[in-house]
Image: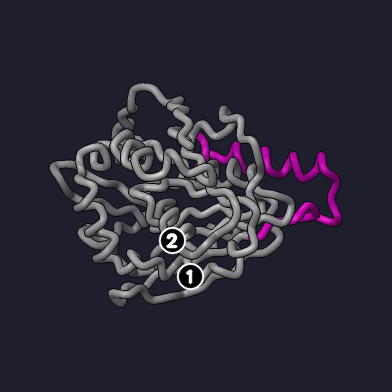
Amino acid sequence: MAIAKNNYGTLRTSRAQEWTNYDNSAFYETIDITEFKGFAASAGITNGCDIKLSTSHWEKARSVLEVGAGYGRVINYLLQHKFLGHITAIERCNKMFNHLQKQYARNENVTLLHCDLHNLNQINFDRTFDVIFWLWSGITEFSFKEQPFIIFELTKLLSNNGILIIDTMPEFIIPLNAAEKTPSSSYTCQMHNTTICGYWISKDKIEETAFLAGFANVTHLNYTTDTNRKRLLHFLSKSLVRYPNTSFNERTHVRKIFMQHPIYCS
């Protein structure tokens, strides 16, 4: 089942010396799907080694959400491994979304959303999710200002005991085709006459953001892909009671202060 909810308008150009995830859109709109699958093969994740490591979290879930579904790697894996719940997948790229529609539009257990992670609060989701996948280092293609905001928004979509699973590269690991990371943890990749910008987020920053977003527990799992690439999974577990010694108003105040911090504001 495909639902076109294309809520974004003209892609924005980042200000001087700054970038946002919108600046990476040109690459995804120009790359061939087959070549894109080749990148997944080079990374060693075609067979879903990352999803397999997360099996205990999703195998009994009623509903899962994947953000940045790409060509359907995660959807394929879940369906092939007899996942019985409902799959919702978000993809902003027009080319990728059209590909997903051809593959899954008739599958009643799959809902496709053509939308933008920046606008999650504008989407009327018909359910909450037991698991949210943000894999293949998808978070790193958002700037350090965007990353916490989107984690906060994803938190709202989780069920009471839901879990957000994020994949990143370990420290000092350079992405394929990327220039070296700068001291600010940013990096760029030059492909198809376009530039992909990225920002490596540390375990400490994930834990800090998770704490302020209301997650109860964060664990990390180092793993090696099928092509011996080092990667890192982060499991952010949610709880209704994150700050037992503070009131709801106090927790809300803390989060407002966090989101108004200069490094997270435009």
- 244 in magenta: yes
- Total marks in image: 2
Which of the two residues, 151 or 126, is positioned nearer the viewer here? 126
N-terminal of the two: label 2 or label 1? 1
Q: Is residue 157 above or below residue 57?
A: above
Q: Position of residue 58 (x, y in %)?
A: 59, 62
Specify the segment rendered in magenta.
237-266
- The residue lying at 64 percent from left, 63 percent from top is 60
Q: Is residue 35 above or below residue 157?
A: below
Look at mark 2 in the image and give the residue it sits on. 77
Residue 20 visible here: no
Q: Position of residue 125 (x, y in %)?
A: 61, 35
57 with respect to 115 (left or right)? right
Which quadrant holds residue 42?
A: bottom left
What whole-number distance in Å separates the C-alpha atoms at marks 2 and 1? 9 Å
Which quadrant holds residue 73?
A: bottom left
- The residue lying at 54 percent from left, 46 percent from top is 109
Q: Position of residue 4 (x, y in %)?
A: 45, 28
Mark nearest the camera among 2 and 1 is 2
Look at mark 1 in the image and give the residue it sits on. 52
Q: Is residue 155 above or below residue 20?
A: below
What SS does tag 1 mark?
helix
- The residue lying at 43 percent from left, 27 percent from top is 6
Report if the CB atoms under discs 2 and 1 are less than 8 Å apart: yes
Q: Position of residue 162 (x, y in %)?
A: 67, 55
- 145 in magenta: no
179 with respect to 58 (left or right)? left
